[in-house]
Image (cartoon, helix red, strand yellow):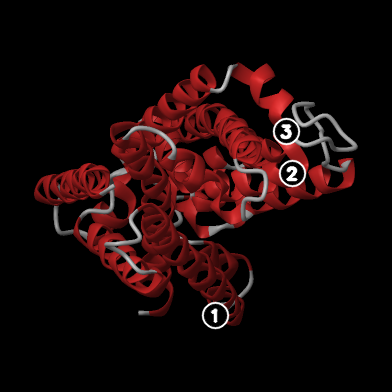
Amino acid sequence: DGEKMSIQLCIVILYIILLFAISFYVKRRASQNPTEYLFAGRQFSAGLVAVSITGMAVGAASTVGVAESATKIGLAAGWYNAAWAIGAIVMGFVAAGKYRSLNCTTIPELFERSYDKKARIISVIGLSLIMICITSLQYVAGGSILHALMPDIFSMHTGMITSAIVFVGITAIGGLSNILSVTVIYLGIIYSLVRILLRDGGISGINAALPAADFNWFSPMGGLSFAVLIGWIIVMTTQAITAQGPVQIACGAKNASAARKGFILGGLLIFPIGFLSAILGLAAKAQFPGINPTMALPQIIMSLDPFSSGMTLAALWAADVSTACTILLGAGTLISQDIF
């Protein structure tokens, strides 16, 4: 076990070093102008917009959280990410290009343009509260991932502190590590899924080992009610159009067309990851019937060889890093543009 843990720790440390290296590289190339830093000099191509919105959307809730709800409602838990994907695509068709054309920096700034200064202040307070909550959750998730996979090295507390230091550090230096994070997320999740399906006799093998339920674990809607699905889609669509993170990404595009195409492409990238995480959650339930749902994803990953589990651990943590950095950058923009 000690050797297994040291392999995993090495993979995670390597990933952290890579993140910091990219951030320093980005910082060296960028000018010291705040717009350059906060909006990447408004030079994002459609591809960069797509990985940025994917990095923001695919966080702890979209991986660990989805696997957790899959142990209760089956494959349908993946609709959580699909709802995010629908929101991103709607943002692409409806608002991303417009935001870029308006050349604004924050939602509160738009409020002031349309109403008055008071409206801007109210909107800053509301958005800041939301961002503090989401960022705190990313630290908690980062801590629980590190603790679950390396309990001898990280307690929940030190895991959270380590996550916070890395997230804030990367954002403060350069903030743009989403290409690496999104690549690591996809490679890690797909690789471990293939290993687990081969080991456990594919979908049919997992399905046969699952406890009986009043719905089919692998049916598209499973234990999810239509009303909840519609609720998810409405919430995700409204937040994709109005939250600071997506708006900031749209404003970082090089033109309105890149903003539009980037969000639509991003939606297509976000769509599958939830269903892949849900299958991993179901594999965990089949293998460990009495499992604590929150531990479903970490537990099934730990049952793999050290290299596979280390890669996937880095992927889960990458999901966390990318979301936290995007939101921290958004919060920083609100403070600097709307308050300072």
Within 10 angstroms of label 2, few (less than 14), some, or many (20 or more) residues?
many
Mark 3 / mark 1, whichever is N-terminal: 1
The crowd level at tag 3 (other Cα within 10 Å; few <14, some 14-19, many 20+) is some
Q: CA distance from mark 3 to mark 1?
A: 52 Å
Q: Label 1: how many residues lie within 10 Å, few (<14), some (14-19) or many (20+)?
A: some
**One can see residue 44 in this view:** no
State left or right for residue 3 relative to residue 139: left
Q: Is residue 136 above or below residue 43?
A: below
Q: What residue did someone put label 3 on? A: 210
Dot 1 amino acid type: Ile
Q: Which numbered disc, 1 or 2, marks the residue closer to the eye?
A: 2
Quadrant of the image for the C terminus?
Answer: bottom left
Mark 1, residue position: 121
Q: Is residue 309 above or below residue 326?
A: above
Seen in the image, is 14 located left or right of residue 111? left
Q: In which quarter of the view is residue 25 placed?
A: top left
Q: Secondary structure at mark 2?
A: helix
Tag 2 residue: 233
Rendering coords of residue 77 (x, y %): 70, 40
Disc 3 versus disc 1: nearer the observer: 3
Depth check: 146 or 96 in front?
146
The amino acid marked with disc number 2 is: Ile
Q: Amino acid at mark 3?
A: Leu
118 or 74: nearer the eye? 74
Q: Residue at x 60, y 39 (%)?
A: 281
Q: Earlier in the sequence, mark 1 or mark 2?
A: 1
Q: Earlier in the sequence, mark 2 or mark 3?
A: 3
